Image (cartoon, rainbow, N blue to C red):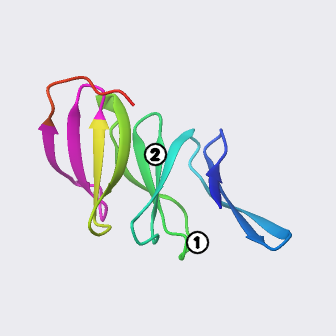
Amino acid sequence: LYFSAQEGILIFYHIKDLQYEIKICADISQPISSLIFSPDYSSLLLVTDQGTVYSYKPAHSGEAVKLLDTSSSCFLAADFLTPGNNYCVSVTISGEVQVWSLEDGTFLSKLNLGTEVHV
């Protein structure tokens, strides 16, 4: 079970029978608004209210890696663009849908919906 604390800490609870173990996985120092697993569960996107997206790979137990920072564009949400785990899609309040490479955070494309978006 993965969850985030208010302070931007990603925490993992390993639960087996009546026993559990707690592990702090990453500290990104920004409140995490959502956690999204990739379709194959190999990566976890950590999305902040400020519009920063981090990638965390549970199998590698490393630090969270900053993929992109959309803080200047009134960021609302992000998710994996399937099939695969290579791309991320984000949306802004103004209705701009953006596609990003998860390998290096490169901005690839955008589409303006022409309307405000609400979650």
Q: Residue furthest right?
A: 18
Report whether 73 appears left or right of 56: left
Q: Name the residue beneath numbered marker 1.
A: 61
SS assignment at label 2: strand
Image quadrant containing the N terminus:
bottom right
Q: Which residues are magenta?
A: 92-111
Q: Main secondary structure of the magenta part?
A: strand
Residue at 13% across, 39% down: 111
Q: Name the residue beneath numbered marker 2.
A: 47
Residue at 33% across, 38% down: 70
User: Magenta includes 103?
Assistant: yes
Q: CA distance from mark 2 to mark 1?
A: 18 Å
Crowding around mark 2 (Cα neighbors within 10 Å: few <14, some 14 to 19, many 20+) is many
SS assignment at label 1: loop
How far from the left and from the top, in percent, is residue 19? 85, 70
User: Magenta includes 109?
Assistant: yes
What amino acid type should be assigned to the residue bearing mark 2? Val
Q: Toward which corner of the image does residue 119 lie, by quadrant?
A: top left
Residue at 58% across, 72% down: 61
2 vs 1, front mark: 2
Q: Toward which corner of the image does residue 97 lie, by quadrant?
A: top left
